[in-house]
Image: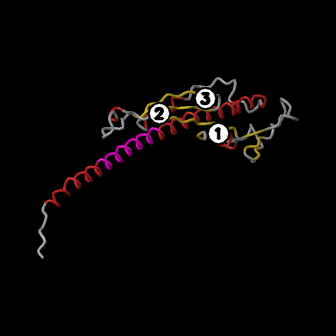
Amino acid sequence: MIRRIRHGDAGQAFPIYITVVGGLLFLAFAYFAVGQAAANRNDAQTAADAAALAAAQDRRDQLAGAWEQNILDPTKWQDIFDGEGLNLDPSCWRADQLAAQNDATVTCAPAGPLAYTVEATTEEPVGDSIVPGTENKYSKESATAVIEPRCEFDLQGWEAGGDTLPLLTCKGEPWKLDPKGPKDLLPKPEDLFDVHLAD
């Protein structure tokens, strides 16, 4: 028995093939658009993290400088470690500087005496994609950096005008302070304060 070949079957499969290929291309472009947006958000988060840390580190360095200037008056140490009652220079300029290096602009503000919050916006938009409006969409992310005092001391038994200073203990490490000794033997800013991003 001779079977007749149906040429119409191949013709019916072609539109299905085109539909499947078109769907796959759409998914590929969609994934690409998602990747673009994720990369842009990541850039914004990186800029925010770096800027917040830079501002907090500048403030930490100023606090350490204030402690060194007042090393002979331990009654002022606690205010310095608390970041209170000090006439320090603004530190957000460092956030602006770091953001510019990461192709972003920022808004920066103190979040208390020992913290800075930064919101970074990318200078480049997400870009053209199959998602409408992304060509003018800029990513915004925020970060907060915290300055944490690492040291404690006890004024009990200390007398103003005496020859000794209270024992300063920073993360379990004791510092026997000699204000008349070389300055490079005093605790460094990173010994006095820890700077990290808020959880």
Quadrant in which the N terminus is drawn: bottom left
Whether pointer 2 and pointer 3 mark residues with C-beta atoms closer than 8 Å, the reply is no
What residue appears at the point 74 percent right and 37 percent down from the top-left corner? 179
Quadrant in which the C terminus is drawn: top right
Q: Nearer the viewer, residue 176 or 26?
A: 26
Image: 16 above or below 90: below
Q: In 3D space, how far apart are the residues under numbered discs 2 and 3 (Cα atoms)?
A: 16 Å
* Residue 48: image location, x then y, percent: 50, 36
Q: Quadrant of residue 132?
A: top left
* Residue 125: image location, x then y, percent: 36, 35
Residue 35 belongs to magenta span: yes
- Side (left or right) of 145 relative to 105: right
Whether pointer 3 and pointer 1 mark residues with C-beta atoms closer than 8 Å, the reply is no
Secondary element type, mark 2: strand
Secondary element type, mark 3: loop
Q: Nearer the viewer, residue 146 or 94?
A: 146
Within 10 Å of the Cα at label 2, are there few (<14), some (14-19), or many (20+) other Cα atoms?
A: many
Q: Which residue is mark 2?
A: 120
Within 10 Å of the Cα at label 3, are there few (<14), some (14-19), or many (20+) other Cα atoms?
A: few
Q: Which residue is mark 3?
A: 111
Q: Nearer the viewer, residue 79 or 124?
A: 124
- Side (left or right) of 32 relative to 19: right
Of the numbered discs in the image, which one, if any, rests on residue 189?
Answer: 1
Q: In 3D space, how far apart are the residues under numbered discs 3 and 1 (Cα atoms)?
A: 20 Å
- The amino acid sitting under disc 3 is Ala
Image: 156 above or below 8: above
Q: How many marks?
A: 3
Q: Quadrant of residue 134?
A: top left
Q: In 3D space, how far apart are the residues under numbered discs 2 and 1 (Cα atoms)?
A: 27 Å
* Residue 139: image location, x then y, percent: 42, 35
**What are the residue bounds of the magenta stretch?**
26-44
Mark with earlier residue (3, 1): 3
